[in-house]
Image: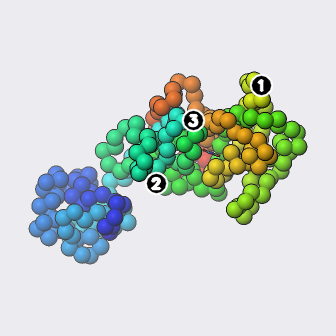
């Protein structure tokens, strides 16, 4: 039972479970016919899947949330928090409204990073996708300002102990891309974890400057050219089951 922002209002929960309309559910609560975790509920109470809701002696199961995933092409300049006290644009602003629940972002990208960001309605799936033990690789296209030597590439592949970290960080692959001009060159690099600012910090540890950073792949999910900057595409059910199977996720 929650008094904070988690969960949904009890009358909405009951309506979504098909017990009554929202208005009739409010009446059931007001008349003392609804108990949450053994205690008679009051109007305005919020509940989550963990709570036991009973109406007139019968346990009500929450309708399972539909598992949906969006592939979003984040522009530079958007932040990945839900609310911003400086009123900057957030990645959540353009997402489609949901009948219930909310979009959860699978990890974050810095304000100056663009590219692939996944959103899902399923908290369990989001946790699995973000957890280091799931071993999902993330690929970034990065424009480096400065001269990149073979020694630097070797250091980045071997692992670098960065300030404030307890274990070394490294890229599992680095490939030079043909584009670039002057002192700017593009690389594709792959990391296995989603640590804060890891791609920038790794390149910067070699005295180099990251002048552009874009995520192009998250595990088997690619950012394809039909998803324009600032737009999203919803994954089909078949794609979602393929993703879950591919990652050995039982969610
Ligand atoms: N690594 C970074 O440094 N920034 C990002 O936004 C993502 C990964």
> Dot 2, how many residues are within 10 Å of its Cα: few (below 14), some (14-19), or many (20+)?
some
Q: Indicate the position of residue 182 as horizontal and vertical percent values.
A: 77, 25
Residue 211 drawn above or below residue 131: above
Q: CA distance from mark 1 to mark 2?
A: 45 Å
Q: Is residue 174 left or right of residue 211?
A: right
Q: Which residue is mark 3?
A: 115
Q: Quadrant of residue 172?
A: top right
Some atom of ligand 1 lies within 8 Å of the CB belonging to the residue at label 1: no
Q: Is residue 166 above or below residue 115?
A: below
Please tell me in which quarter of the rendered image ligand 1 is found.
top right
The residue beneath circle 1 is 182
Q: Earlier in the sequence, mark 2 or mark 3?
A: 3
Q: CA distance from mark 3 to mark 1?
A: 24 Å
Q: Relative to residue 208, is residue 247 drawn left or right? A: left
Asked whether 105 or 234 is in front, the reply is 105
Residue found at the far bottom of this picture: 38
Q: Nearer the viewer, residue 162 or 99?
A: 162
In this figure, which residue is indicated by the disc labeled 2? 123
Q: Residue at x 38, y 66 (%)?
A: 50
Q: Is residue 218 left or right of residue 185?
A: left
Labels 2, 3: front one: 3
- The 10 Å Cα crowd at callout 3, few under 14, some 14 to 19, many 20 or more, is many
Q: Which residue is most to the front?
A: 86
Q: Position of residue 140 (x, y in %)?
A: 67, 38
Instruction: List the single residue furthest toward the right.
Output: 151
Quarter that holds the N terminus: bottom left
Q: Tell me residue 33's x, y (percent).
A: 15, 68
CB under 8 Å between discs 3 and 1? no
Asked if 206 appears above or below 185 in the picture, the reply is below
Whether label 3 lies within 8 Å of ligand 1 gets the answer no
Mark 1 or 2 closer to N-term? Answer: 2
Mark 1 falls on what kind of element?
loop
């Amino acid at each position: 039972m929650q008094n904070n922002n988690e969960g949904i209002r009890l009358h909405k929960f009951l309506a979504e479970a098909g017990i009554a309309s929202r208005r009739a559910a409010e009446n059931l609560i007001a008349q003392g016919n609804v108990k949450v975790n053994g205690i008679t509920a009051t109007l305005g109470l919020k509940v989550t899947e963990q709570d036991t809701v009973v109406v007139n002696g019968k346990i009500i199961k929450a309708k399972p949330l539909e598992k949906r995933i969006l592939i979003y092409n984040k522009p530079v300049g958007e932040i990945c928090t839900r609310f911003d006290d400086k009123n900057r644009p957030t990645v959540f602003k353009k997402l489609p409204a949901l009948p219930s629940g909310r979009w959860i972002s699978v990890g974050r990208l810095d304000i100056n990073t663009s590219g692939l960001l996944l959103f899902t309605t399923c908290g369990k799936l989001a946790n699995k996708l973000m957890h280091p033990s799931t071993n999902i690789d993330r690929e970034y296209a990065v424009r480096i300002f400065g001269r990149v030597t073979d020694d630097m590439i070797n250091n980045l592949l071997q692992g670098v102990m960065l300030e404030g970290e307890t274990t070394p960080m490294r890229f599992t692959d680095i490939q030079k891309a043909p584009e670039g001009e002057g002192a700017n060159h593009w690389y594709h690099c792959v990391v296995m974890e989603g640590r804060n600012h890891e791609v920038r910090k790794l390149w910067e540890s070699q005295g180099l400057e990251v002048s552009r950073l874009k995520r192009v792949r998250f595990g088997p999910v690619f950012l394809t050219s039909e998803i324009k900057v600032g737009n999203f595409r919803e994954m089909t059910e078949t794609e979602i089951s393929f993703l879950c199977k591919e990652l050995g996720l039982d969610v």
